[in-house]
Amino acid sequence: MAFSSTPPALQIDPEAARRLLEPMLPRRLRACLAQDLRVASACSELALEITTLAPDAEALVSAWIGAASSEGGLWRDRRWIARRSALIRFLDVWAVEHDQPVARALADVAMLLSCAGDDRRAAARLAQPLWLEREAVLDLRQGVAALAEAQTRLTIGRVAGQGDDSDVAGATDLAVALQAAWHDALTDALLTFSEKTSSAIAAAATLACGADDAFASDVALVHALVPVGEVLTRPVADSAATRERRRWKKIEAQLVKKSEARRREKAATIDTTPQLPDAVAPPAEVPKGHVLVVPAIQETGSDRGKSIACGYEHIIGKPLPLVAVPDLAAARTRLVFEFPYAQVTIDRLLADLIGREYTTFRPTLLIGPPGAGKTRLIARIAFHLGLGLWRVDATRDAGASLGGLDRRWATSEPAHPIMAVARTGSANPLMQIDELEKSATRSDHGRLWDALLSMLEPETARTYQDPCFQTETDISRVSWLATGNEIGNLPAPLLDRLRVLEMPAPSHADLDALLEPVLAGIAADHELAPAFIAPLDGEEIASLRRSWRGGSVRRLIRLVEAVVNARETLAVRQ
């Protein structure tokens, strides 16, 4: 089929935009804002999630879900309240003991589904979490443009696949119109979610203070928050929506203005370069298997300017080698020996290197429970593949420091990937970012998430403008592997650039396979050969089976160390 040269007037179904954004909302808000939520089915789905997270809660969940099957008349039944309270109390304790914030969120959803709308205690508990989750709704604005572009590509791909011939100009016009339609629909849907979120927060705060509403006393709290809040906020809803739309237009105009200014500045630089009196000599030819990461930099002539290159002379203007891909079969064997429960994850990571000459991974985020060994797996991959490793703690490092600091500041330093290149002496080190989802969300001094965006894209990473050296650098061969416990609060533009892989936690059945690599790791920590630590005997293994039921590898290592230390202490006494 051929595309029409005149772009049609397109309009995206608002419901489609809402369904696309709804899964990105935090758990509590998603329940409150779901238009078609049915309490009975929602309770069943929640029960399955709770038992999957905490199998010990199965009896409490069964008692709760049995009473929840009857939706009416239970709000003030003491037996129903006791079952509900026991389940919520268990999840709260579980969240603290196992460092699982998701358990607290599940407890709040259970309260939303099984408390009446006039329950002051439940409303008071939910008011602050709902307020804190409002920031996640605001963060979705940054991903609207990328999401609209992705939906446009999917739609154009399906349409173009229906015929062999197509009008290129018509296809471009259709893509522009379709992307604009998706952008408008997603913006309106996001505005609706923002308004309903404000209504739910206002209702929770008001009900917690003892406000009386006849409607709220007859329905579940999850169905009461938004309607009650809309009544409270109706006098200012219209003016708030108008101000929101004006702010969106102002932000978009500023972005367009900045983009145009950067384009003009770059064009002016290109035009004036041939007119410089002292032309910079062309760079030397880069040999095969090497990358010119940092070209020659422009010194200012001042003492401060001269100190910029101090410590980086060995990489400035010099091609750096790329680490070649080693024997993948041997590396896989060693990694599977150390992480027998994560064989699928290891295979998916190493698949990036099949048929390649030099080692570079796709930007990847490993998601798994605490203690699953995500950080250690990345470190061991770097070790077995011969890659230099640079570790970034997302809970401490701000985006400004990750992307480099301007040479005008006293604390000026290059971007972290360039510092990793300088330390390892290779053009393709491995960057490890721990706890990515726990990065600070304030943007006063730059967010780490925003700094990552241009580094993860090969095109922009190939010409990354380092603020310290003030020149274009090539960090496109640097590998990025990040870890996290969940992806709920990560912005859409960042997730669009990351491949998400699951890192499973070991189970009780993996104990026998883990003992040998754990003992080898303990020996390495003490700078001993593995033969110096004897294998565990039957009684010691039985004791470990009783103490470790799966989950955290860190806890297993501590238990094995305790057994080894106890054995050595007993041997000395004897």
Image: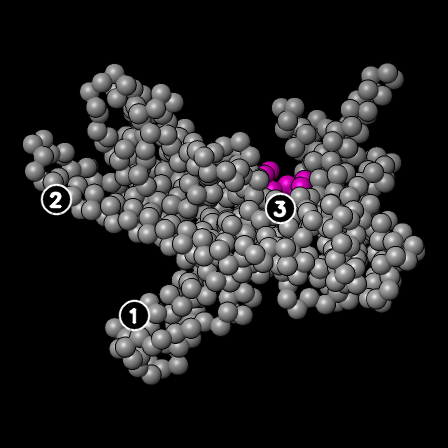
Question: Dividing the picture into quarters, in which one does residue 511 lie?
Answer: top right
Quickly name the residue at label 2: 271
Quickly name the residue at label 3: 131
Quickly name the residue at label 1: 172
Confirm whether residue 445 shows in the render.
yes
Q: Name the side, left or right, on which 281 lies relative to 249.
A: left
View extreme (right): residue: 79
Distance between the Cα atoms at labels 2 and 3? 51 Å
Q: Quadrant of the N terminus?
A: bottom left
Q: Which residues are magenta?
A: 368-377
Residue 568, magenta (yes or no): no
Q: Is residue 355 above or below residue 528?
A: below
Q: Quadrant of the C terminus?
A: top right
* Discs 1, 3 touching: Cβ within 8 Å: no
- Which class describes the residues within 10 Å of circle 3: few (<14), some (14-19), or many (20+)? some
- Which class describes the residues within 10 Å of circle 1: few (<14), some (14-19), or many (20+)? some
Locate residue 417, reporting x and y percent: 40, 36
**Which amino acid type corresponds to the residue marked 1 in the rendered image?**
Thr
**Which amino acid type corresponds to the residue marked 3 in the rendered image?**
Trp
Confirm whether residue 24 shows in the render.
no
Distance between the Cα atoms at labels 1 and 2? 30 Å
> Which residue is pictured at 76% across the width and 48% down the height?
210
> Which residue is pictured at 62% across the width and 59% down the height?
230
Locate residue 289, reporting x and y percent: 32, 43
Q: Name the side, left or right, on which 201 lies relative to 299.
A: right
Circle 2: element type: helix
User: Which mark, residue 250?
Assistant: none
Q: Name the side, left or right, on which 177 lies relative to 568.
A: left
